[in-house]
Image (tube, rainbow, N blue to C red):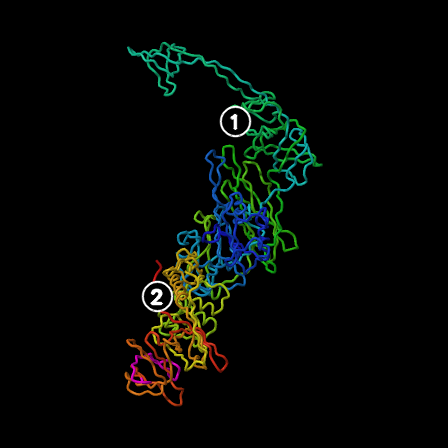
Amino acid sequence: MILVYPSTMPGEPMERHSVTGCTLHDWFSRNIPNYQLDMPHLMSVKVRGRIVPPAKWQALWLDDHITVEIRPQPGDPATLAYVAVAVVVAVAATVLLAPKIPSMNNKSSRQGRSLYEVNAQGNQAKMGDLMPELAGRHRMFPDYLNAPRRYFADTTTQVLDMLLCIGVGQFEIDLDEIRIGETPVGSLGSGIDYRIFEPGEDVTSHPAYRCWYNAPEVGASSGSSGLRLRSTDNATFDGNLATDGDRLEFTIPESWETDMWLAVRLYRTITVIDGGTETVQTEVVTSATVTNGESQTVVTGVTVTRDPETGEITAVDQQTGNVYSGAVSDIQTKTITQTTALPDRVAGDWTGLAAGDRVRIWSEDLSGTFIVADITGNQMTLNTLSGDPVTNLEPGQHLAAVDVQNARYRIVEIGSSREYVALHRLNSDDEIDGAWSAFPAFSGNGNVRVVSNSPGQWTGPFQACPDKEKTSRLEFDIFAANGLGRLNDDGDIRHVDRQVELQYREKGSGEWQSVIETIGAHTRDQQGWTFAVDLPYAMTPEVQMRRLEAEDTDTKALDKIDWYGLRCEIPHKTRYEDVTVLALSIRGSNTLASQTENQVSLVPIRKLPVRVNGEWTEPQPTRDIAPWVAYVARDAGWLDSDVNFKELDRLDATWRPRGDTFDFVTDDDSTVKESINRALTAGFAELTIDRGQIRPVRDEPRGELPQHGYSAQNWLPDSFSRTITLPQPDDSDGIDVEYVDEESWTSEVVPCRLPGDQGFKVEKRKVEGVLDRTRAWRIGMRERRIQKYRREAYQFETELDALNSTYMSHASLTDDVPGYGCSGWIRGATGPAGAVTLQLSEDVEFEPGKQHVIAWRRPDGTQAGPFPVQSSGSGVVVADANELPDLDPMLEASHYQFGTMQRWSYDALVQDVQPNGFESVSVDAVNNDPRVFLDDDNSPE
C-alpha cells in the first residue's frame, strides 16, 4: 500500500494506491513524468517509520505486507513541480470534476456546472487479510465487502453504492458518528441512503448488496475522465483537390459514406487592399448668446440648429440635452478637420457569400471571424462582430480559406470510382442552405474533414468479467466532461443527439452482438449516462465500444464523449456471518465535492459480554479493559476455568472508577498474548501464566505486607547479589508519549518530565489503545518514574522455596550487609498473642531511639509480620504479634528477619523465577519504590 500525504503535517493521506509486484522505483517510473533515480527528490519515503533513501528505492519491493508513506519536503520552487506530480499522481481526476468559473465577458464563453464526483472511499478490500476487531471505541475506516458500484441515476447525478465490513461482532453506532470525510451522514439529507446490518442479517434490502466487477481498463485515468471515444483515423483529407460546382474532386477515403457532414477549407490567394483615409472638415459652435426677455446668457458646449421652414434658431446643451429658450445670437464657431480610416477591401472569388454573413478566415497572418459588410464584384468589406468596420488588415496577398462560420456540407453523392463528392451546404438548423449552390472555382491545396455522422474507432475489446467467472448483466457509463451540444450564433446551446454502440461476445469466440444507445443534451454542464445490458446467457464477455458519429471538433461544438465505466454483476452473498455490515448509497452533490476528504469512517463502540457478580451478561457497549481481555481469551479457546477471573474482576473494580479504558482496532495477526498485553498496558498491568491460568498482574502500590521473605537461611550460599545502577550522562531525561487523540483522530504527543528533566535526551514511546491525553501522560510518567526510582536489582537462588513467588509478587530480602537487617533461626516461642517471647539463634542489636521489627517464615513459605519487637535479654525478644511461629520439629525450622522499621529488609518486586531442574530456583527482583506511583492520578499541566 502506498499512502500519499499532502504535507509533512499530521493528517490523513490524500491518496491510497494498492500496488504489488514491483519496486518503488518501477512505480515512480510509470507514474512520474521525466522521473530519474539520480535527480533531486523533494519528497521523503518512509517504511515502518524509517526513511528509505533513494538509493534503496530500486530494492524496495511492494507487496500486501508493506506500507509506504510519501510526503513532500520543502525545496527550490523550480523543482516542486516534479514533487507535485510525484505526490499527486492522480490529481487530474480530481481537477476534471472541479467546478469551473464562468467568464464575465460574453455568453458564449460561459463554462458549465461541474457534476460533483462521488469519491467516497472506505479502506481497500483486504483479500485474505484478517477482519478488523474493535476494542472499546475507535475511529474505523470499514473495508470493502464488494467492489463499489459507481453509476449515473440521471444525467447530472452520480451514485456510489458501497457495502462495507465494520468489523467482527456487534456495535453501538451513533449515526452522527458515521461520516463522509468530516461530514456526518445525517446532515446530508436525502443524498445518503444507509443501513446497518447485524451479523448474519439478510442484506438484500439495500442495493449495495450486489457484487460488481469493475473492468480496470475502463474509467478515469490521469488526464482523462475515461477512454475517449474518437473519430475514425481517416476522417480528414489534406492535399490537392479541385472544385466543380457543388463537387469536390479528390480521392475519397473508403470509410466516407453519403450523409456524412464535412468541413471544407480551400486555401486560395486573396488580396487585401488598404481602404485609405477620408478627411472631413466640420464647423462646430463654441459659444452663443441666448436672450430671453431682458435676460441674456452666454452658453458653451451647445449645438445650434436652424428650422428650415420657420428659420427659428435653437441651442441644445450637448451633455444634458436641455433646450435653451429665447433668441439665439452672437454664434461663435470654429472649423475642425477629422481624418477617418476607410474599410479595407478584400479581393477574391466570393461565390456563396452575401452581405450579413458571418465568415471565418483561416490564414497564418489573417485569421478571425467577421461579418460581411458589403460585396461589390470581387471585392468584399468586413465588419467586426461588434459592427465596427475592419480597417487594420495587412495589405497584400495572403493564402487563406474563407467560408461561412461553422459551415458544414452534407455528402449527397460519391463518384462511382470515389473520385468526387457532391455536397449540399447546411444552415444553422442543419437544413439545406438554399442560398448556396456551388463552390468558387478552385484547384489547389485543401483540407476536408468529417465532422459528424461517421462511426468512430473501436475502443477495446476488454474482458468485462474475471477469469473463470460468468455474468448475465453488464453496465456501462458514458460521460461528457465538457457538456454536450452546439453553440448558436446568439450564444445559446442547441440540442445534440449522439449514439454509441457497444458490442459484446463470448470471450475469444462468436459473433459480435450490438447494443446502440442514444445520449443527448444542450448544456455545458457535465453529463453522465448509465446503461444496462442483459446478456442472453451467462458468459465471460469481452466488450468494445465506439461512437456512431464523428466528433465535431469545431470551437462551438461540445462533443467530447468518454467511456467512463464498464462492470458486470457476479455472484454475491446475501448475509455475512459474525460481522456487522454498513451499506451506503451516496448521491453526488455539492456537499460531496471531490476536493473534500471523501472517506467513509465511523466511531462505533464494541458490544461484548460483561461480568456482573461473576455472571456474564448479553453483549453490551463497553470500553472497559476486562471484557476485552476476557473476550480475547475465550475467543482463543480458553475456558473460564483457564482465566483467573477473581483477579481480573478485582482489577476491573480498580480500572472502572479511574476511567481506564482500552480503545483499539486490531487488524493484524497479533498473538493472544500480544493482544491481551496491549489492553492490560492501558491499566498498568501485564499478562502472566500462573499455575496454568491466565492471570493479569497490575503494577500498583503495595500497601499490604510482603508475601514471602528470603534471607541467608533459605537462599543458596553466596548466591545473593545486589546491584545499584547509578545515573549516567547518557541517561534519558524525559519521555515523549505518542497516542491517538479521540477528538481529532490524529497522532498527538504529550511530554512526560520529572522535576529537573531538561528534555535534552528524550525517549519516544507509543501507547496503543489510549485516546486520552491525561492517561497517556500517566503511562509515560509511570515509565519515567520507573527509570529513575527502580535502579536496584537483586539476584539469588533458593532450593525450591522461590517457587512460591510469582511475577511482580511482593518480597522482603535480608542479607548480612552491616547497617541493614539481619536474619537467623527461631529456636523457641512462648507467650500469648501481643507478647510473644522468641528465642533467636543469634544475638540481635537494638539501635537506641529506633523502632525495630521482626518477621518470620511460615511453613507454607508466606511471611508473618513484620511485628514490633523489644529486647528481652541476650538472644531473646518479645514481639507484638498475633500469632506464634510454627516450631514443629518435623518441619523446617522457621527463620526470622530483624532490623529497624526502615531497614529490616530490602523491599522487592519479583521479576523472574526460573527453575534450574529439580534442584534450585533462580530469582531476579527489583526494588519497590512508592515514588513510582505518585503520578498515577495526576494530570499534565
At a point 58% along the width and 24% down the height, the residue shown is 394
C-alpha gap between disc 2 and disc 1: 88 Å
In the image shown, does 153 or 90 lie closer to the viewer?
90
Q: Choose the circle earlier in sequence order: 2 or 1.
A: 1
Q: Which residue is mark 2?
A: 934
Q: How many marks?
A: 2
Element marked by disc 1: loop
Part of the protein shown in magenta: 854-876
Element marked by disc 2: loop
- Vertical side of 426 occupied by 325: above or below: above
Q: Examine the residues drawn in magenta and state their main secondary structure.
A: strand
Q: Is residue 89 visible?
A: no
Tag in front: 2 or 1: 2
Where does the image place residue 215, in percent across and percent down from the top left?
Answer: 57, 54
The amino acid pointed to by label 1 is Thr
In the image shown, does 734 or 453 lie closer to the viewer?
734
Image quarter where the C terminus lies is: bottom left
Q: Give the class, few, some or many, for how many residues have Cα within 10 Å of label 2's Cα (few <14, many ≥20).
A: few
- Vertical side of 280 occupied by 807: above or below: below
Q: Quadrant of residue 448?
A: top right
Where does the image place residue 660, in percent across and percent down from the top left?
Answer: 37, 65
Q: Is residue 405 visible?
A: yes
Residue 862 drawn in magenta: yes
Most extreme residue toward the right is 417
The amino acid pointed to by label 2 is Leu
- Mark number, residue 384: 1
Where does the image place residue 401, in percent across and percent down from the top left?
Answer: 61, 29
- Mark number, residue 658: none
Where does the image place residue 520, in percent across and percent down from the top left?
Answer: 53, 43
- Vertical side of 346 occupied by 759: above or below: below
